[in-house]
Amino acid sequence: MSTHDSPVHIVVVGCLIRNELGEILLIRHHKRGWEIPQGRVEAGEGIVDALRREVREETGVEIKPGPLAAVWSKVSPPASLILTFLADYADGELAPSDETPELGWFSESEGVELIAHPVTRDRLRALLDYSGTVACFSYATNPYKLLGSLGQP
């Protein structure tokens, strides 16, 4: 197999952040709408470092990362592997950015209602339903279709 025939996946990290009141932090991405903070792992960067960086860049806050809760495999091009974690708010003030013009703390039910895209809503529900076991999902886009799951429906 030549180098260009090797599988290539974009690695993305994201997390569901809770504050001391149990509220969850969501951002409104300028293109994708409301979602959990997430972003690509850069070359040479560790997963936890990328998670902290993305959260800081998109929200202005620091987190205490928790467990890996779900893994999502997007098979449609560009193929992506999305690692989603749970985290606790640690410090800092919410700070909107050009990429995330709105953000805020919401109840779980408010958060689910805010999210318009089905895959993003499914991701949030999987994190909210975390039971101590990492769930795995594969899906395609355009249109969104869940292809399989392990650990949660």
Image (cartoon, helix red, strand yellow):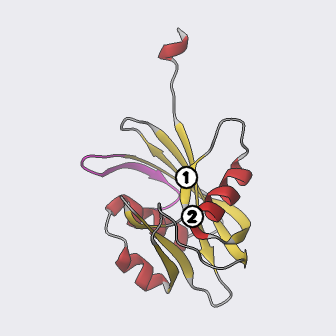
Q: Which mark is residue 58?
A: 2
Residue 40 appears at what percent x and percent y? 56, 46
Q: Is residue 146 magenta?
A: yes
Residue 2 appears at what percent x and percent y? 53, 8
Q: Residue at x 25, y 46 (%)?
A: 142
- Give the residue at mark 1: 39
Q: Residue pushed farthest front?
A: 98
| Residue range corresponding to the magenta coloring | 140-153
Residue 5 appears at what percent x and percent y? 48, 15
Q: Residue pushed farthest left?
A: 143
Q: Secondary structure at mark 1?
A: strand
Q: Are marks 2 and 1 in contact (CB under 8 Å)?
A: yes
Q: Residue at x 46, y 62 (%)?
A: 123
Viewer-closest of 130 and 108? 108
Q: Is residue 103 above or below residue 23?
A: above
- Mark 1 or mark 2, which is nearer the start of the sequence? 1
Q: Report which quarter residue 87 is drawn in.
A: bottom right
Viewer-closest of 96 and 71? 96
Q: Residue at x 47, y 44 (%)?
A: 73
Q: Seen in the image, is 114 located left or right of residue 27?
A: left
Q: Secondary structure at mark 2?
A: helix
Q: Which mark is residue 12?
A: none
Viewer-closest of 123 and 60? 60
Q: Report which quarter residue 33 is drawn in.
A: bottom left
Q: Is residue 12 above or below residue 110?
A: above
Residue type pointed to by label 2: Glu
Residue 98 appears at what percent x and percent y? 47, 63
Q: Residue at x 55, y 76 (%)?
A: 25
Total number of numbered labels? 2
Q: Neighbour class for label 1 at 10 Å: few (<14), some, many (≥20)? A: some
